[in-house]
Image (cartoon, rainbow, N blue to C red):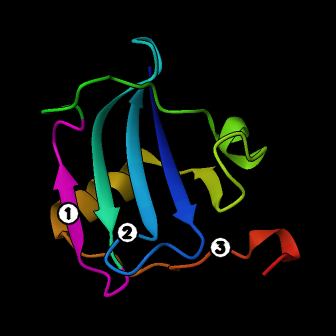
Amino acid sequence: MTEYIKLFWKDAPEGEPPIILYEVDTENERLALRSIDIFADRHTKNIADLYDGVIEIMPIPTVEEFNTHIWGEEFYACIIEQAEFEAIWERRFYDGVLRERWNNNG
């Protein structure tokens, strides 16, 4: 089964993507099949193999784990539809919201 996650990174450092989309294989240790970095100017970087050249392969946390701040308070995640992921992958441009409301904390 596949799950699609939109991860918002509050106060992402300049040059880093404030949004990352993940296509997660929930039947293979939650490894990412593909990901998309979305930058502040809305251009994107498609990543067909997130693990290319990495030393250690880490599974993608669940939305619940991101939102309970196990990985840091600067992250908020939500589930998205496959169609949204595929449209951004194809267009290589993001025209959605760049910042989530952060549960009224900023």
Q: Earlier in the sequence, mark 1 or mark 3?
A: 1
The residue at the far right in this view is: 104
Q: Earlier in the sequence, mark 2 or mark 3?
A: 2
64, 93: nearer the viewer? 64
Q: Which residue is mark 2?
A: 17
Q: Nearer the viewer, mark 1 or mark 2?
A: 2
SS at circle 2: loop
Query: Magenta residues, as a range?
Result: 40-50
Q: Is residue 102 above or below residue 57?
A: below
The reply to whether callout 1 and callout 3 are in contact (CB within 8 Å) is: no
Q: Amino acid at mark 3?
A: Glu
Q: Is residue 76 above or below residue 66?
A: below
Q: Amino acid at mark 1?
A: Lys
Query: Residue 43: where, in percent of width, then height?
Result: 24, 78
The reply to whether callout 1 and callout 2 are in contact (CB within 8 Å) is: yes
Q: Earlier in the sequence, mark 1 or mark 2?
A: 2
